[in-house]
Image (tube, grey):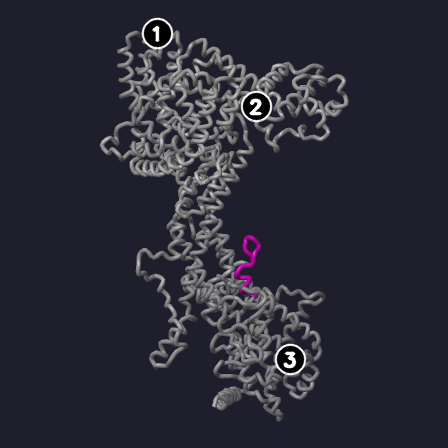
Amino acid sequence: NTVACGDPKAKPSYLVDKNLESAVKFIVRKFPAVETRNNNQQLAQLQKEKSEILKNLALYYFTFVDVMEFKDHVCELLNTIDACQVFFDITVNFDLTKNYLDLVVTYTTLMTILSRIEERKAIIGLYNYAHEMTHGASDREYPRLGQMIVDYENPLKKMMEEFVPHGKSLSDALISLQMVYPRRNLSADQWRNAQLLSLISAPSTMLNPAQSDTMPCEYLSLDTMEKWIVFGFILCHSVLNSDAAALPLWKLALQSSTCLCLFRDEVFHIHKAAEDLFVNIRGYNKRINDIRECKEQALSHAGSMHRERRKFLRSALKELATVLADQPGLLGPKALFVFMALSFARDEIIWLLRHADNIQKKSTDDFIDKHIAELIFYMEELRAHVRKYGPVMQRYYVQYLSGFDAVVLNELVQNLSVCPEDESIIMSSFVNTMTSLSVKQGKPSLLVLSKRKVAYTSVSKASLGIADHKELGKMMNTIIFHTKMVDSLVEMLVETSDLSIFCFYSRAFEKMFQQCLELPSQSRHSICFPLLCTHFMSCTHELCPEEVNTHADTVTLSLCNMFLDEMAKQARNLITDICTEQCTLSDQLLPKHCAKTISQAVNKKSKKATGKKGEPEREKPGVESMRKNRLLVTNLDKLHTALSELCFSINYVPNLAVWEHTFTPREYLTSHLEIRFTKSIVGMTMYNQATQEIAKPSELLTSVRAYMTVLQSIENYVTIDITRVFNNVLLQQTQHLDSHGEPTITSLYTNWYLETLLRQVSNGHIAYFPAMKAFVNLPTENELTFNAEEYSDISEMRSLSELLGPYGMKFLSESLMWHISSQVAELKKLVVENMEVLTQMRTSFDKPEHMAALFKKLTSVDSVLKRMTIIGVILSFRSLAQEALRDVLSCHIPFLVSSVEDFKDHIPRETDMKVAMNVYELSSAAGLPCEIDPALVVALSSQKSENISPEEEYKIACLLMVFVAVSLPTLASNVMSQYSPAIEGHCNNIHCLAKAINQIAAALFTIHKGSIEDRLKEFLLASSSLLKIGQETDKMTTRNRESVYLLLDMIVQESPFLTMDLLESCFPYVLLRNAYHAVYKQSISANA
């Protein structure tokens, strides 16, 4: 809360309230005095809001009170320590000395931070004034609190005076670092020469336990020691002049850093603060010169020294992590190496983070480390090894404590020259407890007992003083370390490798991450950044463990999410680039590209000159795989390398637990791949709404397959279910819209075929050629921008079926049927207009003259035929699509398709129509042709005409068939109605009428529950009016008479309900035979 006061976002609102501005200024000016009388004008607004101020500032005020009480307790404890003449030596009683120095530094930093809160007087004063106005008296803590705030305006100066009586204890503790700190603060070359942290430098001693007289000092944080030395010698500065060992320590610490961490991202600039303090002390000119020299040294050399250390530690930690991954049993004897490595690396990372944010020199190169991720990554690897093989380490050290430490301690106790009875009993009990330890017994609780024993023996009046028996103290330190290996592995990891400070340097943290991703060689280590977010749960301070840091919670989750998201995006982009390259290579294998090669081969055979002389020969597909040199690296190689590095990082951990959330890195990649695959499929259609251009289905299918091949290869790098991605994406593409409401390839191709291809068929620019089973462009003045055959032949329709699947093809069918139903609705309107005439014609089939007279009264005859032709064209296109779907499904699911076909072919005739329609619907979904089209039935049955009875609807349906039948003779006069044997159809698509008549009749009379056979017989009777064309003498009217006769044969051939016998009864077959003969003869003469 004290820190929150200085945060502009978190500070109390009363401090920025304009109404209270004059009151706040008055209170601060008079602080710590309280003058409520004769100042009514300034304090008037305060009077109004006193209760709210008391309520809202209580938390802040009592936090300051807590600080004051903490100060009182610290002073009392320091006095007690001096009175007891406690012996401090970091190498002997490590925990006691460490805790003492930590206490001093915590006290110093707390008072320094307190002095940095600008609003401290305003908050304390406001609360107290509100308290006085409410209760008539100041708060009981206020006089002491106010005085403390005034006294500690310059906290270090005040504390230098305070620590005069504590100088002996503090200086003893600090000088005990003279062997430890210089040994830790070595250059990278010295580390390298000593082969520090190397397990393989001496193979013969690899299994020997790592031992030292000062075990806990080996992994003691350098950062912590520098804080002790800098703050400690500032508080007992006189020892710098009196003790020869103090000055080298002080100077070495000043040369290593320019700033120290006070609290989180609050820093303390060492040289300036020390100089400002010493400048007022007489006779300290030499110390001030030392500080200035050390500052220059720090600015010029510290950056490069730490950079080289980080470089060494990267290789050392990599070696250590690799060896331990291969031989985890070495974690037992070499545990000390692991915690040393973690501590060394953590110190260097924190130093860089702190100094990069507080650069005091122009050159910043030493403070930018693009390889920092690698160091953090190897730290995480070591942490993971410790967590994973914790039981191995515990087993080892339980046996070590009972089998070795207990024996050595027992010998030490036995050899003590003076050992009082009480001490002897305690030590014997201690040895017995250690000896009786076993693996099955579980974790011993020796740690607290050991620490208490060392602390007890450190007091000057102790009967067994540890100062006189340093070997015993060192042995106890070793035992405490070994006990921690059994009891406190997690706590040890936090102590030596916690990097939760990154939580408060989020901008620098993000920058490091971006640098890591930008460098391909470092991207494999990028997972260390999300892993670091798991450290942030320990970012609360030990003095305030109940702190609920919602800010840290939010920052941590957002950072972790951002890191994983960016990693997945980067991987997705690399995969997309690889897919683009592979699609380009696949495109080279398309049939359209082989024409030039074939042409060149033919011309070469016939020895014809081809093209221009200087024209380069086109490279054949596969050339990219031929390498002259192994060192030749293509763009695809670079992409694959970068992808494998990044995927290693994504696949490194299955999930991360951050606060109460679990993150799964692989799921980020999966979701990004789904989104990109969806966009890519739609993008590869290359649909242009303005020009109505779209990719051929076969080309799109080739590209999609190339894309899928690349995506499948991702399973070699990351443990993800790519089949799930395919299922999710491709299944969505079979629907009209995807899960984001965006158009799919189903909707794009459906729209294109309906609005572009079939519309041009209606306009007479394209014809359906039954012989080719494709739509083909007709020669016209304005040539189309696309070749219809390249989009509608059997291979393209099969590709379309492959892409859209049964669901997509069903949507295509439904869209086609919607267009047919709109045409049928218009046809019904035309029938209603001619209702009376058609009714008369229906009863006059046997009266040719009367029929001729009635026919002249009909209106919109051409419109009826044109609309029926459009319906026929749409149905012809649908039959192509259905046939392609059947072919595709027969390859994928042959047994299921054959079962459906068998089911359809064996429906008993007496089956209820509803049941039959269900079977037809199943068959239609599998692409099988049906006697009655279920989709057409559904589309037409949805048409509801108001105020028309079912009987009237049925009559209109019957008359529609009559209308079409009696209109057929008019087609003979159309010049485009000529039948072409080559295409097995007519250029104006009237051959499609056969399909339209049969399908519409079957659907309409299924809906109205009429007899389809009877109505089609009636149609044949009505169409016998074609016979009258033979009697016409006008050549213009009868020029394509034979071509129109053939329509009747096509209608019967197409119909499952009509037979040639029925046709013979109303139209002589001899006329059909002569018609075929005539059209074929005419075709030959036309070709000639």
Q: Can residue 570 be seen in this view?
A: yes
CB under 8 Å between discs 3 and 1: no
CB under 8 Å between discs 1 and 2: no
The residue nearer to you, when weighing 879 against 937, is 879
Q: How far apart are marks 3 and 1 (CA)?
A: 123 Å
Q: Is residue 384 visible?
A: no
Mark 3 vs mark 1: in front: 1
Q: Give the residue at x 56% y 56%.
A: 742
Residue wearing tag 3: 862
The magenta-colored residue range is 736-751
Residue 753 shown left or right of residue 192 in the figure: right
Magenta stretch: includes residue 942: no
Residue wearing tag 1: 422
**Vertical placement of residue 155 versus 791, above or below:** above
- Mark 1: amino acid: Asp
- Mark 3: amino acid: Asp
- Residue 89 is drawn in which quadrant? top left
Q: Give the residue at x 52% y 39%.
A: 507
Q: Quadrant of the N terminus?
A: top right
- Mark 2: amino acid: Leu
Q: Distance between the residues labelled 1 and 2?
A: 46 Å
Q: Where residue 222 sits: x, y (%)?
A: 41, 27
- Give the secondary structure at mark 2: helix
Q: How far apart are marks 2 and 3 (CA)?
A: 97 Å
The residue nearer to you, when weighing 182 against 691, is 182
Q: Residue 114 carries which label?
A: 2
Earlier sequence position, callout 2 versus callout 3: 2
Mark 1 vs mark 2: in front: 2
- Residue 416 is drawn in which quadrant? top left
